Amino acid sequence: AQKVTQAQTEISVVEKEDVTLDCVYETRDTTYYLFWYKQPPSGELVFLIRRNSFDEQNEISGRYSWNFQKSTSSFNFTITASQVVDSAVYFCALRPLGTSGSRLTFGEGTQLTVNP
Amino acid sequence: ETGVTQSPTHLIKTRGQQVTLRCSSQSGHNTVSWYQQALGQGPQFIFQYYREEENGRGNFPPRFSGLQFPNYSSELNVNALELDDSALYLCASSLIPGRKNNEQFFGPGTRLTVL
């Protein structure tokens, strides 16, 4: 069974602050993918990143960066110099590799509000 | 935009009724997954269709059923609606299940309200 925990229900920051969203996961699979999705008020889930379980190299994309630590089963997401447009619900998700399906297991989400 | 479309955008039904939600997958994608997202929660996997057959199912009762058509579009049918079925229903399309680079691209969802 898979489980994804996002302990932070809501985070509120002021524009230009850095913010880190936490994600902890549980799985018995040895190979899996981890994802982050953004859900703006419109409701559509926007894919941000996929990380393989066998690649622990951190990744940076513009103001976004991700810290994957297999030893602590965590996959945290940092937004540097946050902007009002970053306000959304962010979901961390897990998918085992090589199963017959491709179901994603999502966390409960973190509501990020960036105030001007 | 992902190219995944869903209809209708919003729907209001009463308890006991039946509902059909529709999804058109992104061009080139042959797999469709359905998720239910209750208010304030993360999406929950309902089931997936690949080549017109169910290819995995989450913890949902049989009154949740689906179809996939030869053009890879899909329908989600819910019978005997209950109040707890009120949610955002998300459709996601992807390539062949189980492949490595198999991102799921989500549609805008259908907001179902059951009164």
Image: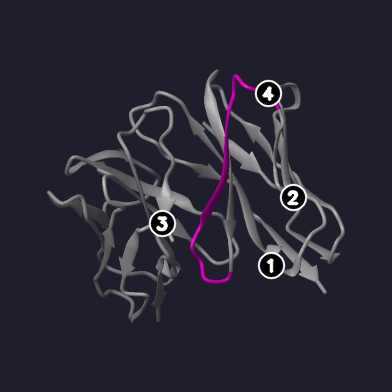
Q: CA distance from mark 4 to mark 3?
A: 28 Å
Q: Amino acid at mark 1?
A: Val
Q: Residue at x 42, y 39 (%)?
A: A103
Q: Residue at x 81, y 65 (%)?
A: A12
Mark 4, residue position: A56
Work out whether residue B57 can be spotted. yes
Q: Residue furthest front?
A: A62
How far apart are the two marked residues, 1 and 3, measured between alpha carbons? 19 Å
Q: Which residue is mark 3?
A: B2
Query: Which is more N-terminal, label 1 or label 2?
Result: 2
Residue A60: quarter of image: top right
Which segment is the magenta one?
Answer: A41-57
Mark 1, residue position: A85
Element type at marker 3? loop
Answer yes or no: are tags 2 and 3 on the same subunit: no
- Asked if residue A51 is among those painted magenta in the image, a careful observer would answer yes
Residue identified by numbered label 2: A63
Question: Mark 2 and 1 residues: CB-CB less than 8 Å, in contact?
Answer: no
Residue B32 in percent (x, y) is at 30, 48
Q: Which dot, 4 or 1, sits closer to the camera? A: 1
Spatial CA distance of label 2 from label 4 is: 19 Å
Measure how far apart labels 4 and 1 are at the Cα level.
29 Å
The chain that hosts pointer 4 is A
* Helix, strand or loop at mark 4: loop
Q: Are marks 4 and 1 in contact (CB under 8 Å)?
A: no
Q: Nearer the viewer, mark 4 or mark 3?
A: 3
The C terminus of chain A sits in image quarter:
bottom right
The amino acid on which the numbered mark 4 sits, given as a three-letter code, is: Glu
The quadrant in which residue B15 appears is bottom left
